[in-house]
Image (cartoon, grey):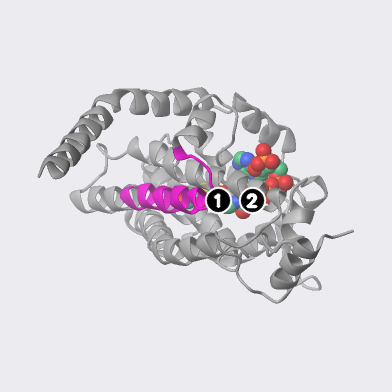
Amino acid sequence: EMSPEERHFQEKIDAEIKIEAKNWMPEAYRRTLIRQISQHAHSEIVGMLPEKNWLTRAPSFKRKLQLLAKIQDEAGHGLYLYSAMETLGADRDEEVAKLHRGEVKYSSIFNYPTRSWADMGTIGWLVDGAAIVNQVVLQRTSYGPYSRAMIRICKEESFHQRQGYEILLTMMREGNDEQKAMVQDSINRFWWPALMMFGPTDTDSPNSAQSMAWKIKRMSNDDLRQRFIDQTIPQLELLGCTAPDPDLKWNEERGHYDFGEIDWSEFYDVLKGNGPCNRERLRTRREAIDNGDWVREAATAYASKQQQKQHAA
Ligand code: 3HC
């Protein structure tokens, strides 16, 4: 039986009225949003690491600048999302400490290594492409600050996807056989992990039912995954590449592509921390925080000195 506040809250959700930080909300609504937004923010920050690997090895100055701009955007997305999370009363340092203790998640996709320059294209095209499919729908999430962060982030993501696709198109059209093989190898390595970004299949998704009832989630994991595949295959064909899935084929009566079974044991393995790069990613993040301690101390010391001056004046 709902309490009067809960009934009023659900009526606002049903009426598509955005929930704002100062509004009453069920504790569980607050908690699941902190869970999702903090992990989304962690994904943006950890997601900078695989790309950093190729910053010093970019094939041209232009490609280096594009990659640098994309990495800086990801950092900004992380900061928007940590700020959205803080409106729910969560503490940023505490949530980051949970990440570094391996207690909370970030997107599985960032636990895969980036072995070639083509991976920078594939990450932009497939990974940011998948993130866009998810985030465009997430613009309609019921929590105001999260929805507004998404609207801003989506504008920048489309640049990421296009510059990634352009890298691959350039390699396929102007590259030699070795470079074309590099593109196909990159797609082979990232195709299935990109599909896993959308989460477990709906029947295995413990958070979906409640998240859909509260309109935090507006489309199911499987529907978003299907939408991503349907829009990506034509782009894959334009590249002259294939997906590593023999069961992939257009299904006329469904009006969608049929595709093969995802290896869920790999998915849950990566979530447990046993992906190829999990330990390296968290170690790098911990070192970044530890090595940055002196900057925070200096900034705090400077700030308190400024305050003393103001009080004295
Ligand atoms: N990687 C890591 N964990 C995942 C995951 C993935 N690909 N997919 C699902 N999970 C986790 C969930 O977080 C949940 O664990 P938790 O309860 O400890 O949080 C568990 O697996 C079960 O999944 P559910 O479907 O029940 O969980 P959700 O309802 O939260 O759905 C989600 C998962 C679709 C990822 C949803 O949380 C979401 O839409 N999050 C916002 C989008 C996001 O985080 N995107 C990250 C992509 S990377 C990115 O955006 C950066 C870009 O610049 C590339």
Position of 63 relative to 263 (above/below): below
- The reply, left or right, for residue 179 in relation to residue 58 is right
Please tell me in which quadrant of the rendered image residue 268 appears: top right
User: Helix, strand, or loop for circle 2?
Assistant: helix
**Residue span colored magenta:** 72-92
User: Which residue is at the front of the view, 37 or 133?
Assistant: 37
On screen, residue 94 above or below 87: above
Disc sitting over residue 88 in the figure: 1
Up/down of 105 relative to 211, above or below = above
Q: Amino acid at mark 2?
A: Arg
Callout 1: helix, strand or loop? loop
239 within the magenta span = no
Q: Residue at x 40, y 49 (%)?
A: 79
* Residue in front for this viewpoint, 307 or 170: 307
The N terminus lies in which quarter of the figure?
A: bottom right
Q: Is residue 182 visible?
A: yes
Q: Position of residue 231 (x, y in %)?
A: 59, 66
Q: Is residue 236 visible?
A: no
Q: Residues within 10 Å of mark 1 (few under 14, many from 20)?
A: some
Could you tell me which residue is drawn at 27 percent across and 31 percent down?
296
The disc placed on residue 200 is: none
User: Which residue is tagged 2?
Assistant: 30
Packing grade of label 2 (10 A; few <14, some 14-19, many >=20) is some
